[in-house]
Image (cartoon, rainbow, N blue to C red):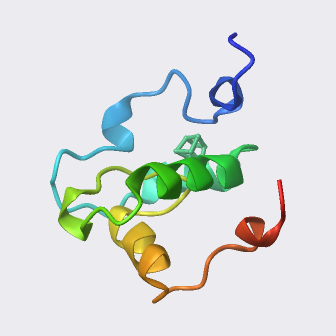
């Protein structure tokens, strides 16, 4: 334990291939099931959006914060509503 939010992640200790398909087209359904019960989903998504910034869609990878690379790109571009957690001040 490091005291970081990652310590609480539902994906901790599981095969990263579930979350990162190395460019393969996939549904990410199993990964999304992990994220759906993850206690740090909001923090995880905030971290991903912050780190990725304006990164082009094709350079984003893996499920993070319950969102696919495409979904995170759309959130950044304002094409998809941001989850409510983003509206709550830290
Ligand atoms: S939201 Fe998903 S990717 Fe993020 S820490 Fe939780 S299980 Fe892992």
Q: Quadrant of ligand 1?
A: top right
Residue occupying the far right of the picture: 89
Q: Is residue 60 left or right of residue 44?
A: left
Count the marks: 0
Q: Is residue 56 left or right of residue 79?
A: left
Residue under the point 83% across and 66% down: 88
Spot occupied by residue 12 in the image (x, y as percentages of width and height)? 56, 26
Q: Nearer the viewer, residue 58 or 29?
A: 58
The correct choice, above or below, for 41 with respect to 11 in the image is below
Spot occupied by residue 36 in the image (x, y as percentages of width and height)? 65, 56
Residue under the point 67% across and 73% down: 83
Quarter of the N terminus within the rendering? top right
The correct choice, above or below, for 44 with respect to 11 in the image is below
Residue under the point 18% across and 64% down: 58
Q: Nearer the viewer, residue 20 or 61?
A: 61
Spot occupied by residue 32 in the image (x, y as percentages of width and height)? 52, 56
Choose top left, top right, bottom left or bottom right for residue 38. Answer: top right
Residue under the point 76% across and 65% down: 85
Residue occupying the far bottom of the picture: 79
Spot occupied by residue 66 in the image (x, y as percentages of width and height)? 54, 58
């Amino acid at each position: 334990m490091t005291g970081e939010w990652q310590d609480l992640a539902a994906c901790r200790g599981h095969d990263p291939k579930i979350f990162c398909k190395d460019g393969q087209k996939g549904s990410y359904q199993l990964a999304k099931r992990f994220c759906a019960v993850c206690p740090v989903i909001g923090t995880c998504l905030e971290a991903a959006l912050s780190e990725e910034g304006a990164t082009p869609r094709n350079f984003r990878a893996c499920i993070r914060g319950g969102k696919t690379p495409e979904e995170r790109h759309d959130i950044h571009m304002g094409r998809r509503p941001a989850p409510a957690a983003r509206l709550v001040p830290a």
